[in-house]
Amino acid sequence: MTSSLTVRGLAVGFGGRLAVEGVDLDVLGGTSVALAGPSGSGKTVLLHALAGLLPLTRGEILLNGTPVDPDRDRTSGTFGVILQSQGLASGLTVEENICLPLQARGLLPEEIAARCRAALADVDLEGAAGRLIDELSGGQRQRVGVARALAGQPVVLVADEPTAELDPVNRERVLAALLDPSLGRIVCIASNDPEIVEACDQALHLRDGHRDGALAP
């Protein structure tokens, strides 16, 4: 069965005002949507709301017709999140940062190891598994954040500017891994990069927290 993410009448308050208002969205498994717009348009707030990191002021988010429970769906691995800040533990190795969330979900050690290897291969960091996060460049840390999300094999993957610090080769590699339609994921990417917007199946353009024009195919 194909997964579906449905957003209806979404409004999100942030900093004492409505940062996003009146957003509707439908995304099917195996497809992607770019959340685009100028700085301050509300795309990151919308992305964080989709990930369950910000409470909704109004509206609803449904996954396969069922209201999303942020605590349950994040901890179960249903949602994967890639943030600009990465949120990596600096005192741990690359491998430990990827494996710990999987261990918390109770996955078997063999499966955890296999997922970690595959995710690191996707972002070309196989040789960095034992290195501390503090030893990595900004671009390498960004790729670790992507690998951690990929290893979780989420139903819904939300990413905030996931290729911002990457060179062209790694940028292309990461984007291909994120947008692989064969995995059946629902992918939402907040980005101002026109190439990323073009690579996604549809684009939701925001301005001042509202949809700016029709949803673009």
Image (cartoon, rainbow, N blue to C red):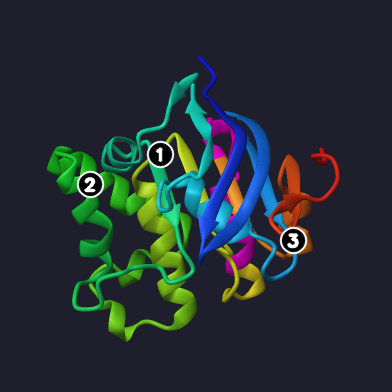
Gap in angstroms between the C-alphas marked 3 and 2: 34 Å
Residue 70's place in the image compared with 122, above or below, is: above
In this rendering, would 131 be left or right of 56?
Answer: left
Residue 110's place in the image compared with 64, above or below, is: below
Can residue 42 be seen here? The reply is: yes
**Mark 2 secondary-structure assignment:** helix
In this rendering, would 82 be left or right of 73?
Answer: right
Residue positioned 34% across, 68% down in the render: 87
Can residue 159 be seen here? The reply is: no
**Mark 1 secondary-structure assignment:** loop
Residue 38: give x, y in percent of width and height: 74, 67
Nearer-the-camera pick, 1 or 151: 1
Magenta span contains residue 177: yes
> Which residue has dot 3 on it?
37
Gap in angstroms between the C-alphas marked 1 and 3: 26 Å
User: CB of mark 3 within 8 Å of CB of mark 2?
Assistant: no
Q: Give, as a three-letter code, the residue at label 3.
A: Gly
> Which residue has dot 2 on it?
102
**Mark 3 secondary-structure assignment:** loop
How many numbered badges does the structure rendering display? 3
Q: Which residues are magenta?
A: 170-186
Gap in angstroms between the C-alphas marked 2 and 1: 11 Å
> Which residue has dot 1 on it?
154
Q: Give, as a three-letter code, the residue at label 2.
A: Leu
Nearer-the-camera pick, 75 or 89: 75
